[in-house]
Amino acid sequence: MSPHILDSATVVSSLSRAGYAFVQANDAAAVLQVPLGELAGLRDTWWRLPRDTYLRDGGRYRFRRHSCFIQEISPPALTQAEHRAHWQPTSYNALHGGIERWYEPIETGVTGSTVWGRLLGSLGALFARVRSTPRWFIEAHQFRIDTSGGIGRPTPEGAHRDGVDFVAIVLLARSSVRGGETHVFEACGPAGVRFTMHEPGSMLLLDDTRVIHETTPIQPQGAAGFRDTLVLTYRAAGFQAPLADTQAGRT
């Protein structure tokens, strides 16, 4: 599960044909025009993520920040939306759905950086080549899964969809852990793949309307370790919100 991606057309073809594309770090940098050195320069901010207090399994292994953006495709423009709760219906997240989860926003040193705007904008333009839309409503999540207490669960809700159009999972760092195998399967079929993301800067791109995904728990390998990711979701129909908000037009 490590195809060589030559250009953006190959990524678009893979997403259109299979519903996913796994892109190695060097290829991702070339396809998205995102310098790996600048992306790596954001890693220190993962050490300052607040603990996720919403975990319903009682765990203390997840740290998180969350911010929202709106991307216009033509002419291209990216703006940060007013800070809002992260919300998913229970049909997509049986464990944590149906509740408003308020996380601390992503630091302005991250969201104001050149590489941040280039990453979000390039991904949005690429996804629009698979499914045309005038704009994307983007939710950005910084995650750290920590093993200081033993097992850490990247996806405690299990195999799932996010209720969006596309998902990008970017690996920032992986240190002193084993496990963390990613599974991607057809939402309406038996086909699927399994692989483990090891290389910082590598990316998994998903058509969330067609596939389900999960990542298995991680355990410490020697000293306690961690797995840092940036998860970006792109949705054409507005931000997900409770029904009352949607009916009132506050998407």
Image (cartoon, helix red, strand yellow):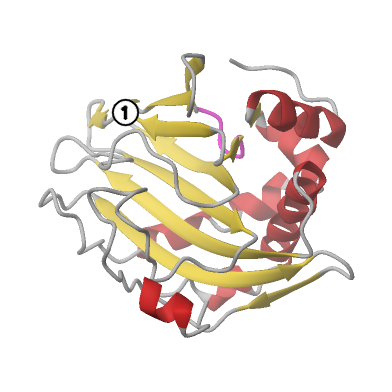
Rendered position, 45 above or below 212:
below
Relative placement, left or right, of 154 versus 173 is: left
Relative placement, left or right, of 211 versus 63 is: right
Point out residue 242 in the picture as x, y percentages from the top left corner. 37, 71
Residue stretch rendered in magenta on the structure: 198-202
**Observer-nearest of 4 and 38:** 4
Point out residue 129 in the picture as x, y percentages from the top left corner. 82, 45
Mark 1 crowdedness (10 Å alpha carbons): few <14, some 14-19, many ≥20: some
**Observer-nearest of 117 and 165:** 165
**Observer-nearest of 130 and 233:** 130
Number of marks in the rendered image:
1
Rendered position, 43 above or below 206:
below
Which residue appears farthest toward the right when viewing the image? 75
**Observer-nearest of 38 and 164:** 164
Which residue appears farthest toward the front when viewing the image? 247
Q: Secondary structure at mark 1?
A: loop
Which residue appears farthest toward the left when viewing the image? 58
Rendered position, 138 above or below 251:
above
From the image, which quarter does the N terminus lie in? top right
Q: Residue at x 13, y 48 (%)?
A: 57
Point out residue 204 in the picture as x, y percentages from the top left corner. 58, 35
Rendered position, 201 above or below 52:
above
Give the residue pinned by disc 1.
216
Amino acid found under the numbered disc labelled 1: Thr
Magenta residues, dominant SS class: loop
Q: Residue at x 42, y 36 (%)?
A: 174
Point out residue 190 in the picture as x, y percentages from the top left corner. 46, 14
* Residue 137 lies in quadrant: bottom right
Relative placement, left or right, of 162 versus 6 is: left
Whether 21 is among the magenta residues is: no
